[in-house]
Image: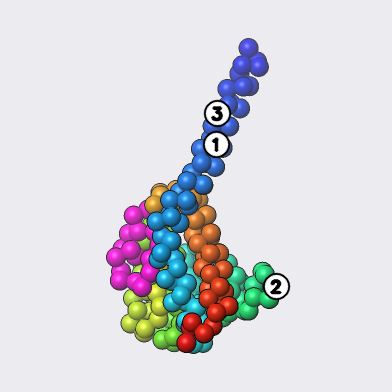
Amino acid sequence: MMITHVDKPQRKLQEIVAQRFDKSVSVPEIFFVSEAAKISQVCWAMAKRFHQGGRILAFGNGACATDAHHVAVEFVHPVIVGKRALPALALTNDSATLTAYRVHGKNAESEFREQLKILARPVDMALGFSPDGKCENVLEAMKEARGRGLLTLGFAGKGGGVLANAGLDFCFTVPDDDPFVIQETHETLYHVLWELVHVFFEHEGLLE
C-alpha cells in the first residue's frame, strides 16, 4: 500500500515534468518556424543600424527588465571570442532615474519614454518586452521611438495585445499564455538575433 501511495505522486510529477519539457520544445519550434523570414529581416535591419553607429535601447517591466539587461550584456560583452562588441543599453539599469519619476509625481507610464527623449537618436533601435503586449510604459516608449525614427522591435506573448498592432517595424509574439515559455522563447530569440547580426557583420560590404 505504501509503495503504491508513493508511486502515484512520482508518476504525477513525471507527467508534469514531461509536459513542461514538451511545451518548452514545441512552442519555440512553432514560433521559430513561422517567424524565420521575419527574423532574417530584422537581423539585416539591426546590422545596418549598428553599422551606421546605432545602439539598442532595451526595456521591460519586472522579470522582463532582466531580459533587457541580458540583451545589453549579450551585445556589449560578446561571449564568443573574436566577435565585436556592439553598443546596447538597458533603460532599466538606472533605478534612481526610474524611481525619480514616481517621487516627483510624474506618470510612471512615461519612465521609458522620457529616457528615450534624452538618449535616443534616429539611428538607434528600441527593443521593448511586454509578455501580454499591454504594458503601458512600453507602449508609450514605442510610440516615442517610432516618432523619432528608431527601429522598433517588440517582444510579446499571448495574442500580442496592443503592442502587436502598434505599427512597430517588427513585433514577435510567442503563441502561448505560459509566462515561462514566453520568456524562454524570447531569450532564445535575442540570442539568435545576436548571432545573426554578427553573421551580417562578417559580410560588411552588404551593409553599405
Q: Which amino acid does label 1 sit on?
A: Ala
Residue sitting at x 55%, y 79%: 203
Residue under label 2, please give it: 81
The label shown at residue 132 is none
In this view, the mark in front (2 or 3): 2
The boundaries of the magenta stretch are 155-173
Name the spot of residue 61 as percent of width and height, x first.
47, 64
* Of the two numbered discs 2 and 1 in the rendering, the one whose residue sits closer to the viewer: 2
Left or right of 2: which side holds 37?
left
Residue 162 colored magenta? yes
Which residue type does callout 2 highlight? Val
Q: For the residues carrying marks 1 and 3, which lies nearer the camera in this image?
A: 1
Which of marks 1 and 2 precedes in the sequence? 1
Q: Find disc 3 in the rendering and name its residue.
A: 12
Nearest to the observer: residue 94 or residue 41: 41
Q: Which of the two labelled residues, at mark 1 and mark 3, occupies the earlier sequence position?
A: 3
Which residue occupies the foreground of this view, 178 or 19?
19
For disc 2, the neighbor class at 10 Å (few under 14, some 14 to 19, many from 20) is few
Measured in 3D between alpha carbons, the distance from the residue under mark 2 to the one under mark 1, in whole angstroms, is 36 Å
Mark 1 = which residue?
Answer: 18
